[in-house]
Structure formats: structure tokens, C-alpha cells
Amino acid sequence: MQDFQKRRFVAFVGVRAGLEELLDWLKAQDIYSLLISSKCTLKESLTYDYCLDVDLDDEAAVIDAIKALPSWVELACFYTTNEYRVPVAAKLANYFKVGKSVAVDGAVNCRNKKLVRKILFDNGLSKLKYKLVKSSKEVMAASMFLRFPVIVKPSNDAGSRFVFKCDDMLEACAAVNEITANTTNYVGQSIDPEILIEEMAVGPEYSVESCTVNGVTHVIAITQKETSGPPRFIEQSHFVPALFDSEQEQRIKQLVIQSHQRVGIDNVVTHTEFKLTPSGPEIIEINGRPGGDHIPELVKYTTGICLSELGAHIAMGNEFETYVKHPVIAESAAVQFFLANENGEVEYMAPKTVMPQIVKSQITVQPNSQVVETTNNYNRLGYVLAISSNNDALQVTQNYIDSIGFKVTANGCCT
């Protein structure tokens, strides 16, 4: 039998699109990629160096499958950028003792919005009152303790799925009924029966991109974001860097550092969403993985740090200070997404002139196609990403959208 030379692999737990550049970065270091997924597609089999097809919700089966890997597979770490797989990646890293030890409790807390809300409130890091309900019958009792409007959402879903702003008890009941009508989240895991109802923080939205290594949190960038607004709050654009005065920025950083300590986060890159309310920053949720929606690219262009690379770098046992930065190529960077605000026909045309500030763009449907209303981050219609030598990258994306005439016109379809 042929004796294969050992190869180092980063084990990616769960699938997430847009990691091709990260895989190239690893390959340049002679590190291979192993995908552990509940269902490996042909495309994934061609993208990754090795694919392991196993039910990620069956932890015992995952461990057995990893133990059965060929002897020439040497695991450098377990790593995920997939929100739903943060806890299992942390558990695997600790079980097999490869790479940096990840705080499992912190990973589990981050994956469950209700746990983060409780920790923040109990430690005086959030003023938002909240209640947990299991059915619409419990909404009336919960509403006695809350001030409307409220946000109603499942504790263990993501991508703005089933997130509702509710102005009164009837709307809150309807939102709870819609959530309970769905038994599983986006990846097929059982929906947490306890639904989170929390008072709505009012103010512009942002996210903090940071990492915590050996108990020390480093804030890398702050992202400004825009959503589609009520009732669903679908993420519509991101812009880096968000602009604050020094006092505001210090207050935000201190809140992130304190919240990470309380939630128990360590040895991961994080994405912390917050609103800047009249009384100060209010954390909405903490995610134990790099931000999605091309945020790692925006941060890379403006700071030299690619968050997805940094996450793998840390997972392999390295320190924040030893990450080698890329050249900074822009003062600002932005991404804007194409949404359908209603069912209808999508219209757009090819841009008439080349816009050098546009890094890339993609629309997933053809002109004159029938589309349904965008209801979450997973059924948006594409994006455009731009950089700028000043702070107008977001305006550049809007200029591009205007130049192609993108719009969705209602025509009675899809009802």
C-alpha cells in the first residue's frame, strides 16, 4: 500500500459561501481544507481538498467519522464561519485538542440569543427588558412587563429569519404564531421552543468586528449598516469604517470588551451587532464567528485584516499579533444588496460605463424575471461591493444601482 505523506488540514465545520480566497490563503501556507458537512455537494467536493459527509447535529457520529479519517490527514484546527455550527466546532476543537482551545460555554451562549440577552441584562450591560414565550397565549402576560414596540424572534435562527417588529400585542401574537408554525431553523435544527420578545432599541445600527485571544479582546473595525426597516429588518448595506467621535468609540469598545468577558468568549473572531441609542450603545446580539455579508472583505480593504483568515489563524493556535496583514487599499468600503420589496418583475440593464471603484457585483436573477418579496438575508437578489479613497464608498454603490436602473415592479405575480 502506498505510504502517503501527512498533510495539515483545517477542518471547516459546516458550509458557508465565499471562502475561496481563504482556501487560497491556506494553500499558500501548504495547508489543506477539509469540509465537514451534513451534505457535501459536487461543487463543494471540487472546492475543498477533502469532504466528510456526516450529520453535524449528531456529535457522536461526527467524532467517529473524524477518528476514521486516513492517517495522512493531520488536523491543524476546527474552524467555522457558519453561525449554526459555532458550538459543534468549539466542542470538536476541545475534544480532539487541536489548535487553540475554544470556550464552549461562550460558543453555546452566542448561538442562543436568549442566553446572550439574559447575560447582558443580568450584568447591567443592557437595559432592554425581555421575556420568553412558547405560544401566543403567553404574549399577554409577557407584554405586561414590556414597552412596545418590541422585537420578536427565535433564539436559534439567523439571517434575519422570522425577526419581527411589533407595535402592539396583536402583532406580537401573530409573529409568535408564525415562528411556532416553523419547526426547524434554516439548517434543519429544531427551533428553540422559547421565543424571545425584547424591547426594541431605537437608533442607527452597527456591528463591531473583533477577536478575543487568551482572554484579551481586540476591536478591529466598526461597521455601519442599514436594514430594510420594519417589519423584517433585512440587512441592506454595510459600510466600513463607521465614523464616531473618540468618546463614542471608546464607549462602544469598552461595552464589547465587557460583554465578551461576561458571555465567556475566547479564541475566536466575533461579530457584535448593536444600535446607538440616545442613552448609548445597546447590543442586539453577539456572534461567535466572523461577520457575513462580505464584511470580512470590507475590513480587509480598509484595515489589511481579513476576518475569516484571522479566525483560521487563531484557531490554528496562533496569536493575534502574528497575523500578517494585507496592504490597505481603501479609505472606505461598502456593500449594498439588491432586495425585492414586493412580489413582481425585476428590471435592470448592464452598466453603460466602467466604474473602477466597483470591486464586484452580482445579480442572481435575469432581467424581466418574476421574483418574490425578499423576506430574509437568504433570498436577497445579489449585491454590489465598492471601495473609495475617501469615505463615500456607500454612495458609490448607490450610484451603480442607479446606473443600471434596478427595480422590482409589482405585477400580480407570485401570490
Image (cartoon, rainbow, N blue to C red):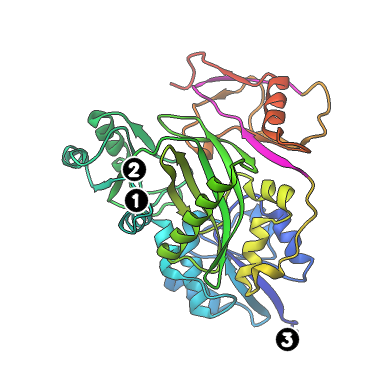
Name the residue at the top extreme.
411
Q: Which mark is residue 337?
A: none
Earlier in the chain: of badge 2 and badge 3, it is: 3
Q: Nearer the viewer, residue 136 or 238?
A: 238
Report if residue 170 is visible in the image. Answer: yes
Mark 1 burial class by Cα count in 10 Å: few <14, some 14-19, many 20+ = some
Which quadrant holds the N terminus?
Answer: bottom right
Q: Position of residue 199 (x, y in %)?
A: 32, 40
Q: Nearer the viewer, mark 2 or mark 3?
A: 2
Q: Amino acid at mark 1?
A: Ile
Residue underneath mark 1: 191
Mark 3 burial class by Cα count in 10 Å: few <14, some 14-19, many 20+ = few
Mark 2 burial class by Cα count in 10 Å: few <14, some 14-19, many 20+ = few
Q: Nearer the viewer, mark 1 or mark 3?
A: 1
Q: Is residue 393 magenta?
A: no
Q: Which mark is residue 1?
A: 3
Q: Position of residue 37 (x, y in %)?
A: 54, 61
- What span is colored magenta in the figure? 330-350
Earlier in the chain: of badge 1 and badge 3, it is: 3
Residue underneath mark 2: 182
Whether residues under marks 2 and 1 lie with C-beta atoms below 8 angstroms apart, the answer is yes
Q: Position of residue 188 (x, y in %)?
A: 42, 52
Asked which secondary structure carries label 3, the reply is loop
In the image, is 12 to the left or to the right of 192?
A: right
